[in-house]
Structure formats: C-alpha cells, structure tokens
Image (spheres, rainbow, N blue to C red):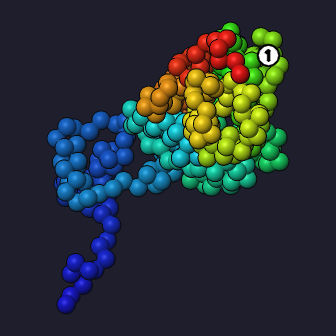
C-alpha cells in the first residue's frame, strides 16, 4: 500500500495551489481570496474562486490579519450563553456583523470576574478587530484596574473596545438605562395598586442587576410604597424558583407582587408560586426585565422592561468597526411593558 491512500494525511491546500490551478499569479489569487481593495478582472476572479472551491481552500484568517493589520473577527465576551438574554444578544451581534462581512467569536465568563480578565488577555494575543464586552460588569471587582490595563493595551495595538450596558469603564459604550427602566416599571405597577413587593436581585454581584434593583426600589418609594423586601437568590430560573419555594407561608401570603431582575428569574419565581398553590396573576403579580423572545409562549403574558437588542447590537457593531474617534455615549431606551401577569389590584384581591 502506498502513501496516497485514503488514510494518509493530506497536505493543506495553499494559496499557491489555487493560483496554479487557476492559471494566475499568486498575488492575483491573494487579491481575490483575501479581500484586497485592488480590482481583479472578472474572468480571473471567477477562475480563482472556482479553483479555491474545487480544491477546498480555506483562507488563513489569522495570517491575513497579521499581514493587513486588521482582522475580520469580532470577539464577543458575555456572561452566560445559556441565559436567554445573552444568547439573544449574541445572535443579534452575529447578524449585524455578518451583514458587513465579519465573523464573531464568543467567549463566556461564567459570571466570574477573574475569568473575564483571563479571556481578555487571551483575546489580545489573537488580535481580533474588536472586543465587545456585553453585560459582564461586576460590583467593585478586585481585578477591574487590571482589566482596564489589558483593554487599553489592546487599543494601543489598533483594536477597538466596546462595552454594552457597562458605563463604569473608560471605553466606547452602548448603554441602556437599567435603573430608569426598572424605576418606570415600579411606578406603573404602584399605580395599579401593588403594595407588598418582593424584589429578587442577584447573588452574583453584577452591576447591571444592582442598578435594576435600585431603580425598582426607588420607583416604589417615589410612589409611597415602602413595604418592599429585597433578596439575592441564585442568578437563574432555578435560583428564583427555589427561593420562592423556601419563603415562609406567612410571608408568601402577604405578597401581591414579585419583581425579578431578569425574565428568566421571573419565570422561575412564577413556577415556584404555582407550586406553592398561589395563582398568577389572581393571587400574586409577577414582573421581569429584558422582554426575551420566549415570553410569547408564557401564560399569563409577562410584564417586563423591553430592551431593543437589535438597536443595541447594531450600535455596538458600528462602534466596533468605525474609524470615527469622536463618538458620544449612546443610551438605548428601556421601557416598561405591562401585560397580563400584573393586572390592576382590586379590593377583593387584598388578603
């Protein structure tokens, strides 16, 4: 048996192979396949593309980036891909990037500040065109200055940094007002008669979640509602459900509203309330934040705060790719959407 059998290792197809097969020079093949701005005759372009396709040629993107001083990849750093909000955010950013011929790589911090720092260090070595950090801000993390230093070094080499919903660091930022969105929701719910409220924050010290808690409590206080309890369960559907199931019976019976800092947690709280025999919304109202797409399948329809993720993603990708250095901070509105899970409280409902 000779070495040309199916089991033998195949040599990777090179740019020279494509050029020879197409009958053109290597620079011409490179201009076609590596996105050069120099024009190539249509007949040559077609021959190169056909040869590349038939040979199975794959461009070496890191090598291209080094040669041209830029990359076609945007690195997206998010907290947790299994969270419906962050998965929706990633999908929107990928859609916006692909529309302009760029790729997105995703790194997940698992909500750990030290892991975020490690990921940024690794990404610096890969030299993506931009790094987008989406909702990964922590409350007073010990590694914050180290993170700032890493990102600034990355910018010094020509990369761009964009933050989403994280206005605490000195970089390009696309924000939505977590505090104001929650505050407005609380004020609207207070006008519907809600007075005994449980607020479910996050045991994970995320800055955006803290802002949502503070905004909601402030909105209730402005409306004269002071009987508000704030707790920090596990930051997940399971964490919210388990917390609600563990409430003392007397405390659970007094509630007329549960607000959770994410829709995912709100749905966990809703499940826990039902398991306790409490009806939503007849006995207790439930509200969340994010307006994730899966809410369309939930009964009753969940009251929440809407965030226009498509606008957030579009602005983030623009800032990641523009050469404009005189950009102002952009805040995308977040506004309450009152639905069936929080009807007006009637006298007969008071327990």
Figure quadrant of residue 263: top right
On screen, residue 271 versus residue 219, left or right, reads: left
Q: Which residue is mark 1?
A: 225
Residue 278 screen position, x and y as percent:
61, 32
Name the residue located 26 percent from the left edge and 80 percent from the top edge: 7
Figure quadrant of residue 2: bottom left
Residue 66 screen position, x and y as percent:
51, 51
Question: In this orientation, which residue lies closer to the viewer: 301 or 315?
Answer: 301
Name the residue located 68 percent from the left edge and 40 percent from the top edge: 244
Question: In this orientation, which residue lies closer to the viewer: 168 or 289?
Answer: 289
Residue 299 screen position, x and y as percent:
47, 29
How would you rate the neighbour count of disc 1 (Cα within 10 Å): few for under 14, some for 14-19, many for 20 or more?
A: some
Find numbered disc 1 in the image and state the secondary structure of the residue it sits on: loop
In this rendering, the count of numbered labels is 1
Name the residue located 33 percent from the left edge and 56 percent from the top edge: 58
Residue 195 appears in view = yes
Name the residue located 65 percent from the left edge and 14 percent from the top edge: 348
Question: In this orientation, which residue lies closer to the viewer: 335 or 53?
Answer: 335
Figure quadrant of residue 134: top right
Residue 175 screen position, x and y as percent:
64, 25
């Amino acid at each position: 048996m000779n070495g040309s059998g199916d089991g033998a290792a195949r040599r990777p197809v090179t740019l020279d192979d494509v050029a020879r097969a197409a009958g053109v020079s290597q620079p011409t093949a490179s201009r076609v396949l590596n996105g050069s701005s120099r024009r190539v005759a249509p007949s040559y372009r077609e021959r190169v593309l056909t040869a590349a396709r038939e040979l199975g040629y794959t461009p070496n993107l890191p090598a291209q980036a080094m040669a041209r001083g830029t990359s076609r990849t945007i690195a997206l750093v998010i907290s947790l891909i299994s969270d419906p909000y962050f998965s929706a955010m990633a999908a929107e950013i990928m859609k916006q990037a692909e529309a302009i011929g760029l790729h997105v790589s995703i790194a997940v911090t698992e909500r750990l500040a030290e892991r975020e720092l490690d990921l940024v260090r690794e990404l610096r070595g890969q030299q993506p065109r931009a790094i987008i950090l989406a909702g990964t801000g922590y409350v007073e993390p010990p590694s914050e200055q180290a993170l700032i230093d890493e990102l600034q070094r990355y910018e010094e080499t020509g990369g761009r940094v964009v933050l989403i919903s994280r206005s605490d660091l000195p970089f390009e930022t696309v924000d939505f007002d977590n505090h104001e969105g929650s505050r407005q929701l609380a004020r609207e719910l207070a006008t519907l008669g809600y007075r005994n409220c449980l607020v479910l924050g996050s045991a994970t010290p995320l800055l955006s979640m803290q802002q949502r808690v503070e905004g909601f409590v402030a909105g209730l206080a402005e409306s004269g509602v002071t009987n508000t309890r704030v707790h920090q369960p596990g930051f997940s559907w399971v964490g919210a459900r388990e917390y609600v199931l563990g409430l003392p019976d007397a405390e659970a019976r007094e509630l007329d509203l549960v607000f959770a800092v994410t829709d995912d947690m709100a749905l966990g709280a809703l499940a826990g309330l039902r398991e306790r025999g409490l009806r939503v919304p007849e006995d207790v109202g439930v509200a969340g934040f994010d307006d994730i797409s899966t809410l369309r399948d939930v009964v009753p329809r969940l009251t929440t705060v809407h965030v226009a993720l498509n606008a957030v993603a579009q602005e983030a990708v623009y800032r990641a790719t523009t050469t404009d250095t005189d950009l102002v901070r952009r805040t995308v509105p977040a506004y309450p959407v009152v639905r069936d899970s929080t009807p007006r409280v009637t006298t007969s409902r008071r327990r």
